[in-house]
Image: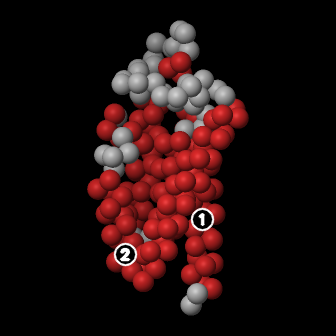
Amino acid sequence: MVLASNKFFWIPFYIFIIFKTYQKLNKNIFKILLFTTALILISDRGSVAIKNFVKRPRPCHYNNPPQEVIVVKHCGGAFGFISSHASNSAAFATFFTLLLFENLFLVGSLIFYALIVGYSRIYLGVHFPFDIIGGYVFGIISGILVYFVLTKLLRKNK
């Protein structure tokens, strides 16, 4: 679960997804990479802003955490709602699912990726389940919005 939470662990997966996107939409890959960068910035910074607004402590920060909480490695920042990991993984998965929806293997892989990242955060004791659900909702909305802006731009440039 520590690996599943590590963004560097997923780099080969990101490269694979981007390669598959290049195979399908090669002439637009630069725009897609630009929008992917914007997507992650929106998802990540937005989730941090929500955390700082809501200010709900992480389960590992309570003085007497529930016995079920397993804290492996470190606890993270002070606040947990919403999970940036869940938001970013859901945003990435949603955006690329919309781009590559014909390929069921890739769609399944993207969904699995987002689910395992979210679950790992609960397992490691750094988020409550609703932190993950909130992150997923924010990430999915971010992914859909950025996808629609991209497709509108691509249609306009045809």
Marks 2 and 1, how far apart at CA: 18 Å
The residue depicted at 39 percent of the width and 72 percent of the height is 21
For label 1, the residue is: 146
Q: Disc 1 residue type? A: Val
Q: Which percent across, then down, holds residue 57? A: 60, 23
Of 135 and 77, which appears nearest the observer?
77
Q: Which percent across, then down, holds residue 23? A: 34, 77
The residue depicted at 45 percent of the width and 34 percent of the height is 121
- Asked whether the viewer can see residue 88, the reply is yes
- The correct choice, above or below, for 25 with respect to 41 in the image is below
- The correct choice, above or below, for 115 with respect to 151 in the image is above
Q: How many numbered marks does the figure carry?
A: 2
Q: Which image quadrant is residue 158 in?
A: bottom right
The residue depicted at 49 percent of the width and 68 percent of the height is 34
Of 63 and 106, which appears nearest the observer?
63
Q: Left or right: 25 with respect to 90?
A: left
Q: Disc 2 residue type? A: Tyr
The residue depicted at 40 percent of the width and 50 percent of the height is 113
Mark 1 is surrounded, within 10 Å at the Cα level, by few (under 14), some (14 to 19) or many (20 or more) other residues, namely many
- The correct choice, above or below, for 31 with respect to 118 in the image is below
Q: Are marks 2 and 1 in contact (CB under 8 Å)?
A: no
Q: Which percent across, then down, holds residue 146? A: 60, 65
SS of the residue at dot 1? helix
The N terminus, quarter of image: top left
For label 2, the residue is: 22
Q: Residue furthest bottom?
A: 158
- Asked whether the viewer can see residue 101, the reply is no
Q: Earlier in the sequence, mark 2 or mark 1?
A: 2
Say the numbered circle drawn on residue 73.
none
Q: Residue furthest top?
A: 64
SS of the residue at dot 2? helix
